[in-house]
Image (cartoon, helix red, strand yellow):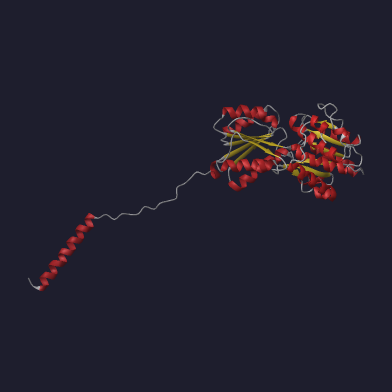
Amino acid sequence: MNKKKVVAVLAAVAVVATLFVGCGTKKVETPKTEAPKTETAKSTMMIGLSTDEGGLNDKSFNQSANEGVNKAKAEDGFNYKAIESKKKEDYTANLESLIEEGSALTFAIGYQMSDAMKEVAKNHSDKNFAIVDSVVKLPNVASIVFKEQEGSFLMGVIAGKTTKTNKIGFIGGKDGEMINRFEAGFAAGVKAVNPEAAKGLTSADGKSAGTTVKYADSFDDTNKGYELAKSLYQGGCDVVYHAAGGVGIGLFKAAKELKDGGKVVWAIGVDKDQALTLPVYADVILSSMMKRVDTATYNESKAQVKNAFKGGAVINLGLKEQGVGIAPTSVKNVQKDVLTLVKTYEDKVIAGEIVVPSDRKGVMSFK
């Protein structure tokens, strides 16, 4: 075979081989992988909240709770729904309504909702719940309580050093164990710095309220707050502290009218810095006892999103935990030396050198 024929044969063999290879080998396409679509808490979770009778815009307790959840929502993007209760009969129905709408964590704001929380949480053991100002001993409920007496003690120190008449008043929402902590702590604070001014705040028998202690039997009746405040101011009190939610607006209104008429009187707010939430009354608000309900609802909402919610926990927040304290705007109307004294007492409470009484009987023996 000559050279040309050899070359031709080799070329033909190469072509045939190539064809066989092409027929026997299938090109494998690498599939394009997409990131798995994960359903995150950020997009699917719902958190619900039901207020007590004070409503979302009480400028105090419920508003603070609502703001805490909204802050967490702004950061984590979950769905959120809040419902206002107008009366006690609404409590269970509101909680059930939130569960039906898919709430994974449901807040009950206020000790008055304790029975409703027990009932609903038992019926929905697969859901999480949190209640403020009461302890519900169930494995799917976080209970958030505060040492209101400690923050109120500081308000008492301020009132006791500010009064000129040595008569100081207190207005509570509903007369019971929880609001009594505000009353007792306040009376003890006044007693610590001005025993004479504490006489009207102190119970005579450890059971009944003192002569300058009034209860509205409500947390939203501003007219009742106005009437009670007027009677206390007319009776000689020049400083009045409230722990009564929306009722306190009536206190501020009465103080404002008297001040505009030339009389020097003061009011002390609660739960939030009320000189900021109610700026129209800022000139008569001596100070406010901060109760960080917003921090509590914020923390529990974040825990739910992170799958770190702890059912059955009891969270107790006082001065040491920064759950209660003195409002920042206090620097405007409280004398500097009084604020220095308040800090001294705050340090003593945190250190355990002073144990603030939480009931009327404790105030009687407090020294």
Residue 141 lies, in percent from the top left, at 61, 33
Residue 124, by quadrant, is top right
Give the mark count. Answer: 0
Q: Nearer the viewer, residue 212 or 347?
A: 347
Q: Is residue 194 left or right of residue 245?
A: right
Residue 37 lies, in percent from the top left, at 47, 46
Residue 291 lies, in percent from the top left, at 73, 41
Q: Quadrant of the C terminus?
A: top right
At 55% from the left edge and 30% from the top edge, which residue is drawn? 125
Residue extending furthest toward the bottom? 3
Q: Is residue 273 visible?
A: no
Residue 85 lies, in percent from the top left, at 68, 32
Residue 90, by quadrant, is top right
Q: Nearer the viewer, residue 352 or 43?
A: 352
Q: Is residue 116 visible?
A: yes
Residue 215, by quadrant, is top right
Q: Quadrant of the N terminus?
A: bottom left
Residue extending furthest toward the left? 1
At 83% from the left edge and 42% from the top edge, which residue is drawn? 157
Q: Is residue 50 left or right of residue 260?
A: left
Q: Is residue 150 left or right of residue 228?
A: left
